[in-house]
Amino acid sequence: MSRALLFVLLVVAAILAAGSCYVVGEREQVIVTEFGRPVGAPVTEAGLHWKKPFVQDVRRLDKRVLYWRGEAREISTREKKFIFVDTMARWRIADPLLFLQSVGDARNAQTRLDNIIDGVVKDTVSSQGLIDVVRASGREMAQDVDTTQDEAPQKPELGRPELMKRITQEAAIRLAPLGIELLDVRITRVNFVEQVLADVYRRMISERQRIAEQFRSEGLGEKARILGELERDQKMTISEAERDASIQRGTADATAARTYAEAYQKDPAFYAFLKSLETLKTALAGGETTVVLATDGELLRLLESPGAAPK
């Protein structure tokens, strides 16, 4: 056998070997097709696998969890409240053969997901109240996002977690015939449309102003109460002080009267002399007082002879 023939045989063998084997990665799964038709079961195990050369081909599909992100949709709630809802979902190819036959590839799958999930989200949200889309628990909803300002605060009937659970269940049923397993659907953002935002902001401002007025009113009432207590305590303190002062003055006056009486009893003449001096001092304290004295009076004699002894 010549070297040229041997080389040709080796090249042919290499081509046949390359065309009859393929490698499956950890993140993918393979469908073997023969003339465009699937053959055998899907290959999900990673490693080296074999196929018929030239007549069979491989279609590779992702085995990982994939993400779908929808566009913001304008949806009307049960109260005719228009909102924008952003959603995202996680999904994976559960049945590669069914997925290949019904969808084809991941790009077509995104389109089918857009149609199915968006439809379910719109139908579910439009049948529920706004509070079920906004709130996640049984907390009361304030009037700033309520339908009317006069209505009392509401509580959600379902809440966002239960709403997303229902959306996931309904969409999963519709996607199962396509070989797609829907893991979950999440509402990532909820916002009002421009026509409603101005009214919402106005109500929010009104609500905050009402709360501020309530706080101010309570503060003024507390201020009045504190000032009233202070005024009462002040009057009580002044009254007690005046009472104590009156008692002290009465005691002092009684002591002075008692002292005067004792002094008068010891020396009535000297006491009368001192009282005369006090009377004279009081009478002449102004500096412009005119005093008329009798010629035989004690005060005149005292003024004429300061050293003279009183009678």
Image: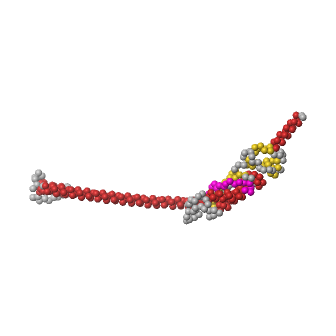
- Residue 180: say if magenta: yes
- Residue 47: say if magenta: no
Magenta segment main secondary structure: strand
- In the visual, does 268 lie left or right of 250? left
Viewer-closest of 273 and 90 = 90
**Numbered range of the magenta stretch:** 176-194
Query: What percent of the width, then of the height, locates residue 26?
Result: 72, 45
Query: What percent of the width, then of the height, locates residue 215?
Result: 48, 59
Asked if 126 appears above or below 4 in the picture, the reply is below
Q: Quadrant of residue 144?
A: bottom right
Image quadrant holding the C terminus, namely bottom left
For the question of whether residue 234 can be seen, the reply is yes
For the question of whether residue 194 can be seen, the reply is no
- In the visual, does 233 lie left or right of 94? left
The residue at the point 14 percent across, 59 percent down is 292
- In the visual, does 266 lie left or right of 98? left
Which residue sits furthest bottom? 150
- In the visual, does 192 lie left or right of 50? left
Query: What percent of the width, then of the height, locates residue 297?
Result: 11, 58
The residue at the point 18 percent across, 57 percent down is 258
The residue at the point 30 percent across, 57 percent down is 241
Asked if 183 appears above or below 3 in the picture, the reply is below
Image quadrant holding the N terminus, namely top right
Q: How many marks?
A: 0
Q: Quadrant of residue 48?
A: top right
Viewer-closest of 29 and 150 = 29
Query: What percent of the width, then of the height, locates residue 135?
Result: 59, 58
